[in-house]
Every structure is written in structure tokens, then in C-alpha cells.
């Protein structure tokens, strides 16, 4: 079947003007919970987009590990490509696509590193295989071949058989939400879009956008 024949109608749900919680972070939590309850795999995955110093955008999937104080927390290597982009330009965009609920959430904001002790605590709670992998990889750096990676893993396993110290360049970023848009697919492509904008004094304003 040609790609352009792949069509569907979006009929599952709607987004009334009064149907959303006044606090978009509460609303985000409700939608995330609903999505997780569908049993979808990798239900906390989202695309995080950064912009490099020469202005090129870049996106990749990461896992959401916490939502707190209007911030989304994810973990990565601070020297990775995304880490280097964010060190230069802390503005980032997060995109969630919850296909089986016909929903999309778009979030714009700035990131900061979370406190080191929190990253260390979280790192220590990860399964040992994840600890080894994080410590054995200089994320985003080229390497000659798979065997060289396997060697790095083996050396890490030998050095730290049961518990790995949190690598200095590994930790959490917290993305503060400045703008968040909830998208609900609707019939005839007349989708619902409600955007919340954070104003300078911290209050939220909303607007409906055309699909
Ligand atoms: C389902 C899924 C979950 C992922 N979770 C993470 C994550 O939480 N942190 C992370 O650094 N990379 C994660 N990755 C890998 C990233 O997508 C990416 O390959 C890696 O972070 C390097 O990106 P960069 O070179 O742009 O920095 C995940 C990939 C997938 C497909």
C-alpha cells in the first residue's frame, strides 16, 4: 500500500474548552497516567529536541523519570551530543506521541542539571546492567567497532562487579515547562489543540489553536 493511502479518522476522544484542568501539569499527569494504563510499551518515552551552536536542530528519544514542580526530569550523559547542545543552549523541546489515544503533547522550556546527589541516588537505584552500560559508553562519541565497545563493557564489569560509581558526566536534566500544548485527534482533521503559556508571574494563560 502506498504511504499516501495510509489514512485514519481520529474519533476516540475530544477536548472541551472546559475539559482540561486549570493546571496544565496536573492535566499532563492525567494524560500520562491514562496512557500508561493502556499498557503501551516505553510509555514514558518522548523525543527531546535540542539546537546546536550552529543552529542545527536534533531530536532523540529519552525516558521521562519524574515530573515535579513544573519540571520534567530525564537522565543522560552530559557530554553526549544532546548534553553538549544543552550546555550551550539550554532551550529544549519535548514531544510525546500517544498514538493509541490519538494524542500529542508538545512542551517548550529550559533545562538545568539536577543536583549531583540526586543523580547519584538515582544511578545507584538502576539495575547493574544499566550502570555498566552508562559507565562503559562515552555517549555519542565514535568508536572503531562493536568489539571495542564489548571490551569497554568487560573492563567496566571487571572494575565494578556489583555497583558502579555514578560517572561524573552522567546525570539528570530538569526541563521547566514554559509552554505546553495538548492535541487530541478529531473527526475530519478538525483536531483539538489547547496551548498553555506560562506568564512572567507564573500564572498560565490558555488559547485554542486551529488544527
Ligand atoms: C525507547 C528509548 C529510550 C531511550 N532512553 C534514553 C534515556 O533515557 N537517556 C539517554 O541518554 N538516551 C536514551 N535513549 C537513546 C537516545 O535516543 C540517543 O540515542 C542517545 O541518548 C544519544 O543521543 P545524542 O547523541 O543525541 O546525545 C533511548 C532510546 C530509546 C529508543
Image (cartoon, rainbow, N blue to C red):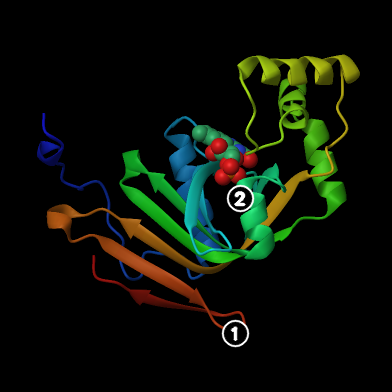
Instruction: Pick whichever, 90 or 32, lies toward us.
Output: 90
Q: Is 110 on the left or on the right of 154, as rendered?
A: left
Q: How many marks?
A: 2
What kind of element bears circle 2? helix
Residue beneath disc 1: 200
Circle 1 SS class: loop
Residue in the foreground of this view, choosing between 80 and 31: 80
Q: Quadrant of the C terminus?
A: bottom left
Quadrant containing the N terminus is top left
Q: Considering depth in this image, is 5 or 142 the residue closer to the camera?
A: 142
Residue at point 27%, 56% (across, down): 14
Q: What residue is drawn where x is 71% and y is 30%?
A: 137
Residue 85 placed where, x, y %?
62, 57
Q: Which mark is residue 93?
A: none
**Where is residue 19 shown, x and y percent of the image?**
36, 64
User: Which mark sits nearer the N-terminus, 1 or 2?
Assistant: 2
Image coords of residue 24 (percent x, y): 50, 65
> Where does label 2 land, which residue?
82
Give the number of the mark in front: 1 or 2.
Answer: 2
Q: Is residue 18 left or right of residue 57?
A: left
Distance of mark 1 from mark 2, alpha carbons?
A: 28 Å
Amino acid at each position: 500500500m502506498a504511504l499516501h493511502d495510509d489514512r485514519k479518522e481520529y474519533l476516540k476522544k475530544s477536548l472541551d474548552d472546559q475539559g482540561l484542568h486549570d493546571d496544565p501539569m496536573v492535566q499532563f499527569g492525567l494524560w500520562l497516567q491514562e496512557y500508561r494504563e493502556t499498557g503501551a510499551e516505553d510509555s514514558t518515552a518522548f523525543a527531546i529536541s535540542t539546537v546546536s551552536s550552529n543552529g542545527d536542530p536534533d531530536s532523540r528519544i529519552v525516558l521521562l523519570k519524574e515530573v515535579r514542580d513544573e519540571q520534567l526530569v530525564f537522565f543522560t550523559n552530559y557530554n553526549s551530543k544532546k548534553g553538549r547542545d544543552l550546555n550551550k543552549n539550554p532551550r529544549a523541546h519535548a514531544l510525546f506521541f500517544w498514538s493509541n489515544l490519538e494524542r500529542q503533547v508538545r512542551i517548550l522550556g529550559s533545562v538545568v542539571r539536577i543536583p549531583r546527589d540526586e543523580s547519584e541516588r538515582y544511578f545507584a537505584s538502576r539495575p547493574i546492567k544499566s550502570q555498566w552500560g552508562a559507565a562503559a559508553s562515552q555517549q555519542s562519541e565514535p568508536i572503531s567497532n562493536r568489539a571495542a565497545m564489548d571490551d569497554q563493557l568487560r573492563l567496566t564489569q571487571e572494575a565494578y562487579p556489583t555497583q558502579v560509581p555514578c560517572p561524573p558526566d552522567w546525570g539528570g536534566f530538569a526541563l521547566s515547562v514554559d509552554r505546553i500544548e495538548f492535541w487530541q485527534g478529531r473527526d475530519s482533521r478538525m483536531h483539538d489543540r489547547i496551548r498553555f503559556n506560562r506568564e512572567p508571574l507564573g500564572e498560565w494563560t490558555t488559547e485554542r489553536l486551529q488544527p
